[in-house]
Amino acid sequence: MESIVLIGGAGYIGSHTAKYLYGQGYQPVVIDNLSLGHKEAVQWGPLEIGDMTDSEFLRRVFQTYSPTAVIHFAAFAYVGESVTDPAKYYRNNVAGTLVLLDAMREAGIDRLIFSSTCATYGVPQRIPIDESNPQRPINPYGKTKLMVEQILEDYDSAYGLKSVALRYFNAAGADTEAEIGEDHDPETHLIPLVLEAAAGKREHISVFGTDYSTRDGTCVRDYIHVTDLAQAHFLALEYLKEGGASDRFNLGNGLGFTVKEVIETAARITGKSIQVDYAPRRPGDPPELVGSSDKARSVLGWNPQFPSLEVILESAWRWYVKKNSSA
């Protein structure tokens, strides 16, 4: 069985990708320091506990499993924290990635799938956002991801290390079999926060801004089911195995939903009343962020299987109820 190393594979998207790869006949090997990931989410292959900044640790893991490719999820990803503590982000997201890349070169591993973000675009010039939009990140988190994309271009030119960077929009939902799901601490994503409000774990959900130029005045965002993201990582891996050139792809479903629509759909699916607190706009929140995934569809053959908001919320609620009933 061919081994693929997943750096940060005990996290939300990483664990779903591990399950998907296992279903496709791969052996996912998870490297995670468990600072943000969850040991119980690693169910489809070995877990090696350590940090990507430890070159000796990486050397040992690569020698043990002889992976043919690496998928890199390990990054700090809180926008606000990146503003107040940029050193943490540059040290891990950029300097840590350099350690990983050099360990890959030493081990002769020349294929990398990189977890990037739509935050590299900053405030987009046009909607939907395609790959030709200028990349002008407005926070250190987005800047670190863009820096790594640029490093990967240079490592391809100089060393022949092929890479695919996948720029996510809003990952959402949970494994359709409710084996794993979204579990951040602190939680900052809208859908799990809304479900916590539905479950009575929090008193209300805050809506920041109701006067945007959108269909109901609240922000529009592009939500993509986490299993569809996992499928994209598998397809990117196959693309590189078949000799594909290094490239960059947006991953969104092309459908935007307002904050109010997310709350209303969650109330309908859960059968619960959700209290809403309307608050002023937050600085820096664009009215609309919706991605075009035409390139990923045409080049990678990516076809999201769970594009509807209802399916995304149903899967997230099913996992949430299961997790909290067994707690």
Image (spheres, rainbow, N blue to C red):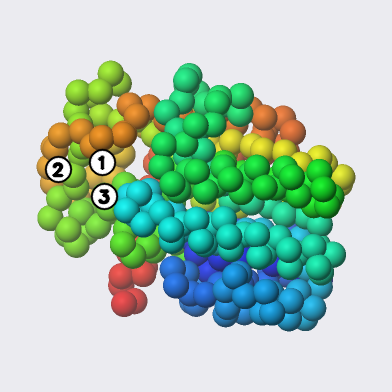
Residue annotated with mark 1: 263
The image quadrant where one finds the N terminus is bottom right
**Circle 2 residue:** 276
Q: Nearer the viewer, residue 172 or 246?
A: 246
Q: Position of residue 53 (x, y in %)?
A: 59, 70
Circle 3: residue type: Val
* Position of residue 90 in the picture relative to residue 115 (left or right): left
Mark 3 or mark 1, earlier in chain: 3
Query: Could you tell me which residue is drawn at 34 percent across and 29 percent down?
Result: 286
Q: Which numbered disc flags the more N-terminal residue, 1 or 2?
A: 1
Callout 1 touching callout 2 (CB < 8 Å): yes
Q: Is 121 positioned to the left or the right of 109 in the image? A: left
- Indicate whether 33 appears above or below 249: below
Asked if disc 3 and disc 1 are in contact, CB closer than 8 Å, the reply is yes
The answer for how far apart the CA atoms under marks 3 and 1 are is 7 Å
Q: Amino acid at mark 2?
A: Val
| Residue 14 seen anywhere in this rendered image of the structure | no
Kindly identify the residue that appears in the image at 36 percent across and 68 percent down: 322
Please rate how many residues cluster around mark 3, counting C-alpha atoms within 10 Å: few if below 14, some from 14 to 19, many from 20: many
* Quadrant of the rendered image containing residue 2: bottom right
The residue nearer to you, when weighing 224 against 9, is 9
